[in-house]
């Protein structure tokens, strides 16, 4: 039996006691929010299931070390994509929709306002990049998360306090990510704790240059920076410098992004599974 949720895994384990049925649990989160009894259940599940499927090598390493699991019990299986939706989409101008001038570079990111996404680092990067005199707009395709309201309010306060309204445009959650990515000059992303950064992979396979923080997971999916520009984590100055360098050589970097697109499509294709 294959399950994707730890609560489902718990109930499956209960009803299969005494039956020789193997249970595979695909775990796609760190579950840092679990406390008390729920955390005890989660630990028990990891010990009892027959096999664990992780989304990245860094997540697998965390599970084996934090919960003393055998590496043979865990497998890494990258999220795979069918590229039809990236190649066949209805074009709608984001610049026209949000009145963004053609002379501005279009930078973007995808994700909701949650601490693990560290959207604040993007805000701080924008503040520093603004000082270079670059004409750009950074669009944020995401929304407020109810349980992280205080984090959203912190970002909003910083945005207002620093006067970033001329450089950051909120465009909300989108159903047309492929359309958005096709129009970006640069995709930026920063994360503290995700098992896999799916929007980053989507950007790479769409042929968009990416600048992201250099944590273990990002180094893994970029093959140590081969497929994206990595900045020093928690260093907004390095973040803005990397962004500026990509924009300064944008035409050459766009050609490189097309090579990245072809190579990453081979790595993350559903056909490999």
Image (cartoon, rainbow, N blue to C red):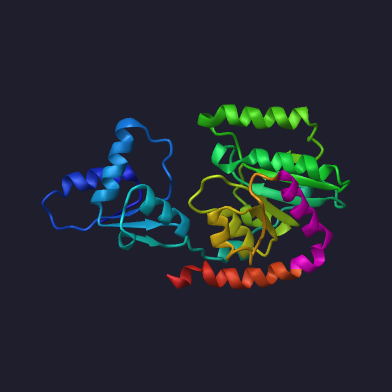
Residue 91 appears in which quarter of the rendering?
Answer: bottom right
Residue occupying image coordinates x 79% and y 46%: 137
Could you say which is closer to the camera, residue 149 or residue 231? 231
Seen from the viewer's position, the closer of residues 261 and 45 is: 45
In the rendered image, the vertical position of residue 66 relative to residue 34, given as above or below: below
Q: Residue 203: where, in percent of width, then height?
A: 63, 59
Quarter holding the N terminus is bottom left
Q: Is 127 situated left or right of 75 in this image?
A: right
The percent position of residue 215, horizontal first and vertical second, equals 57, 52
The quadrant the C terminus occupies is bottom left
- Residue 126 screen position, x and y as percent: 76, 42
Q: Main secondary structure of the magenta part?
A: helix
Q: Is residue 24 above or below residue 165?
A: below
Magenta range: 236-254
Which one is nearer the viewer's eye here, 35 or 184? 35
Report the residue at 62% width, 72% height from top.
Answer: 262
Horizontal relation, residue 204 to residue 41: left or right: right
- The residue depicted at 23 percent of the width and 47 percent of the height is 12
- Which residue sits at x=25%, y=52%? 49
């Amino acid at each position: 039996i294959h399950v994707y949720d730890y609560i489902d895994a718990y109930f499956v384990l209960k009803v299969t006691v005494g039956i020789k049925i193997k249970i595979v649990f695909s775990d796609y989160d760190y579950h840092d929010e679990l406390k008390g009894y729920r955390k005890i259940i989660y630990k028990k599940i990891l010990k009892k299931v027959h096999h664990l499927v992780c989304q990245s090598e860094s997540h697998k390493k965390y599970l084996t070390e934090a919960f003393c699991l055998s590496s043979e019990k865990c497998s890494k299986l990258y999220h795979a994509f069918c590229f039809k939706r990236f190649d066949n989409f209805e074009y709608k101008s984001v610049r026209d929709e949000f009145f963004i001038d053609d002379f501005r570079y279009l930078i973007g990111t995808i994700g909701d306002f949650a601490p693990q996404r560290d959207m604040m680092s993007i805000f701080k990067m924008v503040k520093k990049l603004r000082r270079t005199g670059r004409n750009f707009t950074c669009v944020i395709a995401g929304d407020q998360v109810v349980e992280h309201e205080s984090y959203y309010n912190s970002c909003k306060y910083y945005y207002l306090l620093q006067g970033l309204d001329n450089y950051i445009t909120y465009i909300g959650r989108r159903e047309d990510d492929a359309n958005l990515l096709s129009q970006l000059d640069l995709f930026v992303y920063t994360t503290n704790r995700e098992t896999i950064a799916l929007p980053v992979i989507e950007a790479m396979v769409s042929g968009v240059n990416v600048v992201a923080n250099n944590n273990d997971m990002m180094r893994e999916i970029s093959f140590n920076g081969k497929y994206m520009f990595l900045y020093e984590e928690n260093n907004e100055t390095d973040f803005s410098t990397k962004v500026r360098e990509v924009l300064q050589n944008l035409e050459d970097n766009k050609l490189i992004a097309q090579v990245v697109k072809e190579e990453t499509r081979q790595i993350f294709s559903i056909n490999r599974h």
